[in-house]
Amino acid sequence: MVIAADLQLVTDALGIALDRGAGLEVVSTIGTAREAIDEAARLRPDVIVIDYDLPDGTGAEAATAILGHNGTAAVVMMAKEDSNEVLRSSLEAGVAGFVLKSAPLAELIKVIRLAAEGKLAIPRPVLAKVIKLQRDNARQGWDRDRAVRELTDRELEVLRWISRGLENRAIADNLGVSVNTIRGHVQKVLEKLGVHSKLQAVVAAARLGIIEL
């Protein structure tokens, strides 16, 4: 795991707490967006924890660059506020998790572990706010009927399992198919909904009324 935050004290403290107290291996702690992008490319970690406010850019900008080169990584965004702009840019970047900096360490650890397992890692109140934001800014020409027509019954079923927080392995076990088959379904769901992450897929589906949360 890589941690990028604007203060060295924060990265060092988090690194020690997660590495020693939570048993999560931290391989690098850095302080800028550029370093986060470079370290992610060099180390290819499973999880990158990024502060939204970095001295040379936003965490969302860094996340976009990182996921453009390593789509299998899980990016967890830390932010001091959940304003519309922070949520919008984080969602568009494709983050797997979101946590406020005011949250207790236990919540950050939970979010990191969920993200690492491929599960949704965003608090329900924040998720509800994201869905409302997306509903208020719905893209022109995109409607529920079209989305429902394009998604197959199996893809809708996989989407519902994703919304319940299940990772690919668990979905595969529930449906009696291989993990590779589920990965294929997930990719099709993302493509048909025009999104880049499971979180974005759930938000889009909830906004369109395809699933209920």
Image (spheres, rainbow, N blue to C red):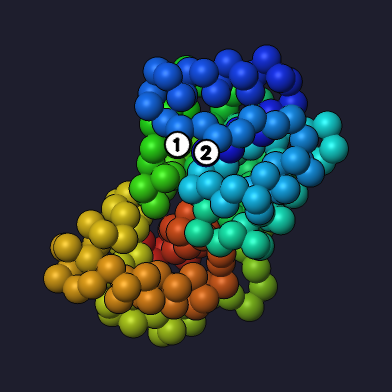
Residue 29 picture location, percent across and down: 64, 30
Q: Is residue 125 above or below residue 176?
A: above
Judging depth in this view, the residue of 115 and 92 nearest the camera is 115
Q: Is residue 194 left or right of residue 161?
A: right
Residue 184 picture location, percent across and down: 38, 76
Number of residues whose C-alpha sits closer than 10 Å to that of mark 1, classed few (under 14), some (14–19) or many (20 or more): many
Residue corresponding to mark 2: 1
* Residue shown at 45% from the left, 73% from the top: 187
Q: Secondary structure at mark 2?
A: loop
Q: Nearer the viewer, mark 1 or mark 2?
A: 2
Mark yes or no: residue 186 visible. Answer: yes
Q: Given the image, on which type of amino acid does mark 2 rest? A: Met
Please tell me in which quadrant of the rendered image residue 106 appears. top left
* Disc with the residue nearer the chain's start (1 vs 2): 2
Query: In the image as oriented, which residue stretches furthest toward the right?
Result: 56
Residue 186 picture location, percent across and down: 40, 70
* Residue shown at 59% from the left, 48% from the top: 43
Q: Is residue 69 above or below residue 114?
A: below
Q: Is residue 169 above or below residue 186?
A: above
- Please give the label number shown on residue 72: none
Judging depth in this view, the residue of 109 and 37 nearest the camera is 37
Mark yes or no: residue 95 visible. Answer: no
Number of residues whose C-alpha sits closer than 10 Å to that of mark 2, classed few (under 14), some (14–19) or many (20 or more): many
Disc tally is: 2
* Residue shown at 71% from the left, 56% from the top: 65
Residue 88 picture location, percent across and down: 66, 49
Q: Are marks 1 and 2 in contact (CB under 8 Å)?
A: yes
Residue corresponding to mark 1: 112
Q: Given the image, on which type of amino acid does mark 1 rest? A: Ile
